[in-house]
Image: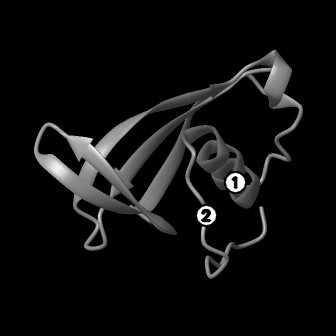
Amino acid sequence: MQFKQVKPYSAFTSAGKVTVENINLQSVLDNLVDNVTFKYTLADKDCAIACDGVVVLGPDTYSTWDATDRGAYEIVCKKLGLELLPANIFKAG
């Protein structure tokens, strides 16, 4: 998995309190018209997985996504209340 760094965020999981510092995204379903589902994984500083889930961009938000990796991370982080750190380097696309 290729994680991107986020501003540290304390969260509670079934394993107890963790500090989330990384996020990974994967597009699991995209109809290329008005709906995309992203699976996200949140992890600590050592990339030990803390939790995962999905974020769906439906017709009301799909058009706000620019279909780039950076755009996906930015919009998912915003929906999750996380701040993507600017030090992340993204390749074109």
Q: Residue at position x 62%, y 82% from top? A: 87
Give the quadrant of residue 22: bottom left
Identify residue type, mark 1.
Glu
Q: Is residue 24 above or below residue 89?
A: above
Q: Residue at position x 82%, y 17% from top? A: 59
Q: Which residue is mark 1?
A: 74
The image position of residue 63, as x and y in percent, is: 89, 31
Q: Residue at position x 62%, y 43% from top? A: 76
Does residue 55 appear left or right of residue 91 in this picture?
A: left
Q: Does the residue at mark 1 contact the one at mark 2 (Cβ under 8 Å)?
A: yes
Q: Secondary structure at mark 1?
A: helix
The image position of residue 79, as x and y in percent, is: 63, 38
The image position of residue 19, as x and y in percent, is: 30, 61
Q: CA distance from mark 1 to mark 2?
A: 7 Å
Does residue 87 appear left or right of residue 68 in this picture?
A: left
In the picture, the quarter occupied by the C terminus is bottom right
Give the quadrant of residue 33: top right
Does residue 3 appear left or right of residue 78 in this picture?
A: left
Q: Which residue is mark 2?
A: 84
Q: Secondary structure at mark 2?
A: loop
Identify residue type, mark 2.
Leu
In the picture, the quarter occupied by the N terminus is bottom left
Q: Residues within 10 Å of mark 1 (few under 14, many from 20)?
A: some
- Return the residue nearer the eye: 33 or 49: 49
